[in-house]
Amino acid sequence: MSVSVVIPCYRSAQTLPRLVERLVPVLTARGEAFEVILVVDGSPDDTWAVAEKIAATTAHVRAVRLSRNYGQHNALLAGVRLARHETTVTMDDDLQHLPEEVPVLLDALGEDVELAYGVPRTEEHGWLRSFASRSVKLAIGRGMNIEGAHEISAFRAFHTYLRDAFAGLVSPDVNLDVALSWATTRATGVTVEMDERTEGTSNYTPRMLVRHAMNMVLGYSTAPLRFVIYLGAACGLLGAVLLGVILYQYFSNKIQVAGFTTLASMIAIFSSAQMVAIGVLGEYIGRIHQSNAGRPTYVVRERSDIDAHPDLPH
C-alpha cells in the first residue's frame, strides 16, 4: 500500500534532517509509492527554512508552513488533508518515534484493522508526565466512549479514506483521535520500540495535557453535561436526606436551635454544585461562540511540493 507520512514540526530544526534521512530509505525499501509531508506549525526558529530545504533537495518530501502556531492536532489535520496515498502515518518530529518502526504499523493494517497505534514497550516519560498522559487517555475513553483509548499515541497508521468522516470539520480545537473514532472502531495497538528525546524538551507539559483533555471532552462530548445532571440529582438526594433528618428531629422534639454548621455546609455544597454547573455551561457557550465567530482550524501560509521539482527522481 502506498503511504503518506505526516510530521507536524515545531522547534525541530536540529532533528528534521536526521529524521528524513532515516525515514526515506525505510519507505523506499517497501517498494511502494510514498511521500513525506512536513507541516511546520508556526515554529519561531528556523524549522521552516530547514523543512523547505529538505523538500527542495529530497524526492517525495513536501513542506507546508502554517501561518501561526495552531497546535499539534491542527497541524496533523492539515497534513492528513493533503495526503495523496492509500494509507497515512503520523509521527513526531523528535526521533522518539523510530522511522524503522513505520513498517510495523503499516503491516498491522488490513481488512479487520483500519487504524493502528504504536504502543511503546516501556514508558519513556517521568512519572508526572506519564500520570497526566494516562489521565488524558482515561478522559478520552470515558468521556467519548472510545474503546482502547489507553493505546492511543501520536504514532499512528490508518487508511486515508477515514478522513472523509471529518472532511467538514472546522474548529479551532481539533483532536485527530476523536475524529478518527467517528470513522472506525477497528483499531488496535501495536508494540513498537521508541527512543529517548535527544534534542530540546517536550512541548507537552502535564498542564498542557490536562488542558488538552478538557478540550477533547468539552469539544467533542456531552459527558460533562450529563455529569452536571448527575451532580444535581446527587445534591437533590442529599438535600432530601437532610430534610428527613431535620423533620425527624422536629417531630421527636430533638431539634436544636443551633444549626449554623449544618446550614453553612448545605449552602457550601449547593453553591459549589451550582458553580460547577455554570462553569460547564459557560465552557460550552464559549465554544459555540468561538465556532460561530469563524475561527479557522488552520491557515496554510505557503507550501513547497515535490511537484515543483521535476528534476528530482520520484
Image (spheres, helix red, strand yellow):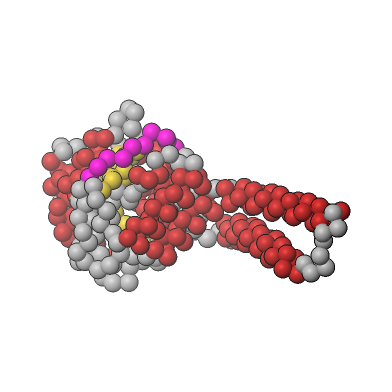
Answer with the quarter of the image where residue 198 lies.
bottom left
In the image, the segment drawn in magenta is 183-192
**Percent position of residue 105, x then y:** 25, 40
Q: Which residue is at a point 46% across and 61% down the rendered structure image?
A: 211
In the image, residue 132 sits, relative to residue 46, either above or below, namely: above
**Percent position of residue 232, x then y:** 68, 52
For the view shown, which residue lies furthest in the front direction? 253
For the view shown, which residue lies furthest in the top direction? 111
Q: Dividing the image into 4 quarters, which one contains the N terminus?
A: top left
Q: Which residue is at a point 69% across and 65% down the rendered structure image?
A: 265
Report the label total: 0
For the view shown, which residue lies furthest in the bottom direction? 45
Answer with the quarter of the image where residue 84 lies.
top left
**Percent position of residue 150, x then y:** 38, 45
Magenta segment: does it hold 276? no
Magenta segment: does it hold 187? yes
Q: Which residue is at a point 29% across and 34% down the rendered structure image?
A: 109
In the image, residue 122 sits, relative to residue 163, either above or below, namely: below
Q: Dividing the image into 4 quarters, which one contains the C terminus?
A: top left
Q: Is residue 192 visible?
A: yes
In the image, residue 144 sits, relative to residue 211, either above or below, namely: above
Q: Is residue 292 visible?
A: no
**Percent position of residue 233, x then y:** 69, 49
Q: Which residue is at a point 30% across and 37% down the rendered structure image?
A: 86
Q: Specify whether 306 is left or right of 113.
A: left
Answer with the quarter of the image where residue 290 lies.
bottom right
Provide the major secondary structure of the magenta segment: strand
Q: Nearer the viewer, residue 204 or 71?
A: 204
Q: Nearer the viewer, residue 192 or 268?
A: 268
